[in-house]
């Protein structure tokens, strides 16, 4: 018995010694945060064990992981081990006020101050959205934060200010322009931008500018764009006051305009020279916009609506009341992606645009209702058999397909005639098996001109406004399927 007991005690001592030897190589963890288990994803010991195993990764990889976390979870990585403590502080701050408010019962000011004081580094991004700008306390906390030296080298600023009780745009806080020398991305919304506020302001590094519900004059809009010599992306959404933008830029790559507004909004866009412009989109089909371009040699993506008049050099495209295209510019032959916002699904208009843009490869169409008819077999028999007309479209997205006869005629035109078609996506309100079976038969998919094409029916989640063309086309999350 004594020999057996001695053997067991010796084995126990060996196991304890081995355990201690393993533990000595593990990072020494700081005392746990009592609230960490509730919010940061480390709710039990197994998750914490996995986090400790991350200690084997090199610092640069750990920094990449922490940079992807929301600010609260990124801050809490400091409690995992000694090695983790300096990592979060060495990363630039990414402050999103929405994340802070949602995880702190609406309290913003104290948390912002604690984050900035504990980090003691630089801040690269600061975001305050309109839903948070209805509280005077939040406004005061944000203003105090913007004055901090931590934000002196701010790269990205998303700043919205709104008052829900009278919905009148407030004057722009002058302090946001103290970041103009370093800003690369600026998103401004729901305030009045006066000419005096922009007096002498330059944006030497600004690459992306978004103006959303901003009241500003022609002078302010034009001077803000002109004083941004590095600007590549310009998005104007429902701004009022300014009616004309005239630009001459060697850096702009994307321009998108949504001029929906009951008040005077932008009516004319003149692009004198934009040698690198690739994307030009009008987002609102209920308000007229006249676009004149003199030199856009690299333009590939074009967004048209039925209320837009577009002049591409010698090509004059007018969609209202019907498709009328005059002349043909060299740049029209280079358009590869066409985004159409149509009040009605009109095949006549699309066919005329196909002849205007012979190199078209991607076609995205958003329509409000079906056209009265889209018959084409007799009407376009000569055009289809002509050797000078060929459909080069490879990708088509239709938002949305209602299944009416005019819709069927529209889709079958491409099904039976587009020989190089690769993908067609039809957004529908219902995707039950009976509906899909009926319309696969009605669309004659078994007789497709392109044998390798894929026709997909996708459920349309909700009514998508024309402004979402910006997301669907520019980011290409639908056009690339």
Image (cartoon, rainbow, N blue to C red):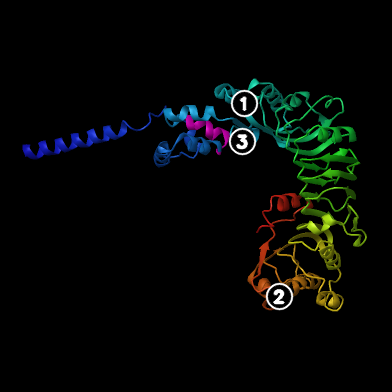
Density class for disc 1 (Cα within 10 Å; few <14, some 14-19, many ≥20) is some
Q: Main secondary structure of the magenta part?
A: helix
Task: From this view, report whether residue 282 is shown above or below residue 145.
Answer: below
Pointer 1: what residue?
112
Alpha carbon distance from label 3 to label 2: 51 Å
Q: Is residue 417 above or below residue 427?
A: below
Give the SS element for disc 1.
Answer: helix
Q: Where's residue 336, x and y in %?
A: 75, 58
Residue at 55 percent across and 30 percent down: it is: 91
Residue 112, image x and y in percent? 62, 26
Looking at the image, can residue 33 be seen? Answer: no
Q: Which mark is residue 385?
A: none
> Looking at this view, is 250 or 221 the one in front?
250
Relative vertical location of residue 396 with respect to residue 98 in this rendering, above or below: below
Residue 24 forms part of the magenta stretch: no
Q: Earlier in the sequence, mark 3 or mark 2?
A: 3
Say left or right for 47 vs 445. left
Report the residue marked by disc 2: 449
The residue that disc 3 covers is: 99
- Disc 3 is placed on an element classified as helix
Boundaries of the magenta span: 68-78
**Does the stretch in magenta take in 73?**
yes
Residue 72 percent location from the top left of the image: 55, 33
In screen coordinates, is 230 left or right of 453? right
């Amino acid at each position: 018995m004594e020999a057996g007991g001695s053997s067991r005690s010796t084995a126990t001592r060996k196991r304890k010694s081995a355990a201690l030897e393993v533990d000595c190589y593990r990072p020494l963890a700081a005392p746990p945060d009592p609230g960490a288990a509730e919010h940061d994803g480390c709710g039990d010991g197994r998750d914490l064990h996995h986090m400790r195993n991350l200690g084997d990764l090199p610092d640069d990889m750990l920094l990449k992981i922490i940079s992807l976390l929301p600010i609260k979870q990124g801050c809490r990585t400091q409690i995992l081990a000694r090695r983790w403590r300096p990592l979060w502080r060495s990363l630039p701050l990414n402050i999103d006020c929405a994340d802070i408010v949602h995880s702190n019962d609406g309290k913003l000011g104290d948390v912002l101050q604690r984050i900035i004081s504990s980090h003691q580094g630089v801040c690269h991004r600061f975001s305050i959205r309109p839903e948070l700008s209805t509280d005077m306390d939040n406004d005061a906390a944000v203003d105090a934060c913007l004055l901090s030296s931590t934000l002196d080298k701010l790269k990205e600023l998303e700043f919205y200010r709104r008052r829900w009780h009278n919905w009148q745009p407030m004057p722009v806080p002058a302090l946001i322009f103290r970041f103009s020398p370093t800003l690369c991305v600026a998103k401004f919304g729901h305030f009045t931008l006066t000419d005096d506020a922009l007096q002498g302001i330059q944006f030497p590094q600004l690459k992306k500018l978004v103006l959303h519900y901003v009241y500003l004059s022609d002078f302010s809009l034009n001077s803000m764009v002109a004083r941004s010599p590095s600007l590549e992306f310009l998005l104007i959404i429902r701004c009022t006051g300014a009616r004309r933008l005239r630009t001459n830029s060697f850096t702009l790559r994307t321009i998108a305009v949504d001029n929906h507004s009951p008040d005077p909004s932008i009516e004319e866009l003149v692009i004198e020279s934009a040698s690198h412009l690739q994307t030009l989109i009008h987002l609102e089909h209920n308000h007229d916009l006249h676009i004149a371009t003199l030199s856009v040699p690299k333009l590939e993506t074009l967004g048209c609506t039925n209320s837009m008049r577009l002049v591409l050099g010698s090509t004059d495209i007018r969609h209202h009341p019907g498709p009328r295209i005059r002349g043909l510019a060299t740049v029209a032959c280079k358009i590869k992606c066409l985004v159409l916002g149509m009040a009605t699904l009109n095949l006549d208009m699309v066919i005329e645009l196909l002849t205007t843009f012979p190199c078209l490869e991607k076609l995205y169409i958003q329509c409000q209702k079906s056209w009265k008819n889209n018959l084409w077999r007799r009407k376009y028999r000569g055009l289809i058999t002509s050797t000078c007309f060929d459909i080069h479209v490879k990708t088509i997205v239709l938002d949305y397909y209602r299944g009416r006869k005019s819709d069927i005629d529209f889709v079958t035109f491409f099904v039976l005639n587009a020989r190089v078609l690769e993908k067609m996506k039809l957004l529908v309100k219902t995707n039950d098996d009976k509906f899909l079976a009926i319309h696969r038969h009605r669309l004659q998919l078994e007789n497709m001109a392109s044998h390798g094409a894929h026709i997909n029916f996708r459920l349309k989640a909700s009514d998508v406004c024309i402004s979402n063309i910006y997301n669907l086309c520019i980011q290409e999350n639908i056009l690339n399927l």
